[in-house]
Image (spheres, helix red, strand yellow):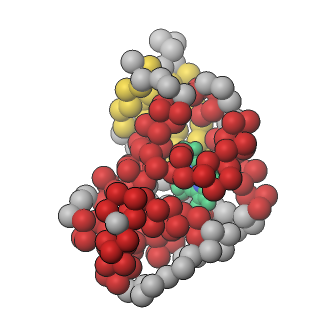
Amino acid sequence: MYGLVNRAIEGLVCEKFGKESWQNICRRAGLGDPSFLAMEAYDDAITYSLVGAASAELGLDPAAILEAFGTYWTSYTIEEGYGDLLSMMGNTLEDFLDNLDSMHTRVGGTMPELVPPSFDREPQPDGSSILHYRSEREGLAPMVLGLLKGLAQRFDVKIHIEQLEPAGKGHERFMVRRA
Ligand code: HEM
């Protein structure tokens, strides 16, 4: 994944647990003292080992780390200059979810090696939505949970999220209902 992701993990850890924890995590992950470049593509294995090492160092479940990361991501990307792009993608949570693929397509304009996930919102008769999430990567559904929570904060709405049974390999589904 692009270094932007690894840098965001660093930002989250340093903000919540301090720089020393980050250094310990990097040591555990066998990375020494890395300085990731936001616009350079790194092996996915580096990101997964950072999450694993953070889990061991902080005594937290990897899923909890991924979820916190997802929530952090929505504010981190604004700090990193993606605020205008995010603002263009919709004024409501539902519109925004409809535009996630075009948002990543735009991101891909400056990150040619991007391998983005794909999202598809299926509106339900009662006003709720089923969000389909497809990815070539494994185990990142908790990140999507955190992202949805971060987006609900962004749009100042309260939502219930329920992870449904996967619809197939690499195809997770979430029921998103306004509270
Ligand atoms: C403008 C803001 C955003 C930027 C710049 C951005 C960029 C990226 C980048 C660089 C990756 C790593 C993939 C790679 O390097 O190949 C990624 C992955 C991902 N993004 Fe975004 N993204 C943004 C917003 C969002 C939002 C709002 C969501 C909400 C659902 C989202 C969902 C994901 C997920 C779930 C992944 C994990 C990769 C996977 O599932 O395969 N992103 N994004």
Left or right of 108? Residue 119 is left
Residue extending farthest top: 126
Spot occupied by residue 58 in the image (x, y as percentages of width and height):
24, 65
Q: Nearer the viewer, residue 19 or 112?
A: 19
Which residue occupies 60% across, 52% down? Answer: 79
> Can you give x and y, in whole percent of width and height, for residue 117 in the image?
58, 52
Furthest residue toward left: 59
113 vs 128: above or below: below
Figure check: 162 above or below 82: above
**Does any portion of residue 122 appear in the rendered image?**
no
Q: Residue furthest right?
A: 109
Q: How many numbered tags mark residues here?
A: 0
Q: Residue at x 59, y 42 (%)?
A: 119
Quadrant location of the C terminus in the rendered image: top left
Q: Quadrant of the N terminus?
A: bottom right
User: Would residue 179 appear left or right of 117 to someone viewing this image?
Assistant: left
Q: Is residue 43 visible?
A: yes
In the figure, residue 135 lies in which quadrant?
bottom right
Q: Nearer the viewer, residue 89 or 98?
A: 89
At 72% from the left edge and 64% from the top edge, which residue is drawn? 111
> Residue 21 versus residue 58: which sits nearer the camera?
21
Q: Is residue 77 left or right of residue 16?
A: right
Q: Nearer the viewer, residue 100 or 120?
A: 100
Residue 107 percent coordinates (x, y)? 72, 54
At which x and y percent is residue 110? 77, 62
